Image (cartoon, rainbow, N blue to C red):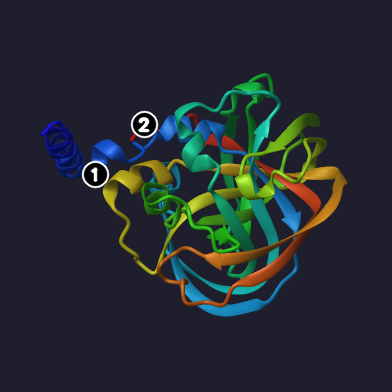
Amino acid sequence: MISQRISTAMLVGGLAALATPLQARAQALPSPSALAASLDLECYRTPGPTLDKELMLTHLNPVLRDLGLPQHKVTIKELAQTCVPVQKGDQAIGPAKPFIRHIDFACFRVEADPFPNEIPINLTHLNPLLANLPQHTVYLHRPAQLCLPVAKNGKLPPPEVLDLVQFIDLECYETRPLPHPQFAVGLTQLNPQLDVIPPHPMNLDWQPRQLCVPVRKNAQFIPKPQLDIIKWIDLEKFSADPVVQIAPVQVQLQQLNPLFVDLQWIPVVLKEAVALMVPVAKNGHMPGED
């Protein structure tokens, strides 16, 4: 009788758990500011295959949208870099960490028309560890890369994380940068598959630099909760000087965006870290300020 009551209680408890809304059990989405301010990506030189795909891109960031930057075509060429999430120093990342640790990009060179005239953008560092660095201006010239979200070695992010990261596409522009102070950071890998890479320092120079901004591919639908975060992800890519050498790490890159999931996996070797992408705000508009 007692065992029957225990079994009944376990059954009721199990049904109650099943009745719990999925949203209550899933990882809650971070705020736009929590994710944008803590997203740092270390980029490795990983030359790879050419995709030769033509896409129509639309800017998502409100600042660039309000500047009237038009839809435009790009042709995706060869793989140039693989960028992976890192932590700077011993900085606490907070509630966005479960998402940030799964944000990895394969960055491909693109062919596209330059702007008729350079577009000046004023940038402010968002990461608290770089708050002492000054506001600065860069001039957008032409699209240079398109960074596509990827998983590594067939290990997909948790479903609620995948719902966000699969739609993060960043178009990186060549810029004509004005001088910026050199700076140094200590980097630690966040993705659990790369914990074999030891913490290491990186020195960053002020040129060449790129500005990477969120875009939509081919009018692809992005759910509003995810779009409200993605549109505030802006990253300035600083070049490492010198390049950081690590013991080679082999990984397989798997496309996450629904438009590209049928593409073959790409093998790459991480051994030369050549750049760091750090979060910035544009023209004084902070993440979440629509």
Tag count in the figure?
2
Quarter of the image for the C terminus: give it.
top left
Residue tagged by mark 1? 22
- What residue is rendered at 61% in x and 55% in y? 173
Pointer 1: residues within 10 angstroms few (<14), some, or many (20+)?
few
Pointer 2: residues within 10 angstroms few (<14), some, or many (20+)?
few
On residue 289, the disc is 2
For the residue pair 285 and 223, the one nearer the viewer reads as: 223
Task: Give percent across and percent down for residue 6.
Answer: 17, 33
Relative to 142, say whether 24 is above or below.
above
Relative to 25, say whether 81 is above or below.
below
SS at mark 1 in the image? helix
Q: Residue furthest top?
A: 132
Along the horizontal axis of the image, is 85 left or right of 54?
right
Q: Amino acid at mark 2?
A: Glu
Quarter of the image for the N terminus: give it.
top left
Report the Cα–Cα distance between label 2 and label 1. Answer: 29 Å
Asked if residue 106 shows in the view, the reply is yes
- What residue is rendered at 21% in x and 39% in y? 17
Along the horizontal axis of the image, is 166 left or right of 249?
left
Choose top left, top right, bottom left or bottom right for residue 16.
top left
Task: Give percent across and percent down for residue 283.
Answer: 50, 34
Q: Residue furthest bottom?
A: 52
Task: Give percent across and percent down for residue 14.
Answer: 20, 41
SS at mark 2 in the image? loop
Q: Amino acid at mark 1?
A: Leu
Q: Earlier in the sequence, mark 2 or mark 1?
A: 1
Along the horizontal axis of the image, is 186 left or right of 219?
right
Task: Give percent across and percent down for residue 64.
Answer: 45, 47
- What residue is rendered at 61% in x and 52% in y? 118
Choose top left, top right, bottom left or bottom right for residue 82.
bottom right
For the residue pair 179 and 127, the one nearer the viewer reads as: 127
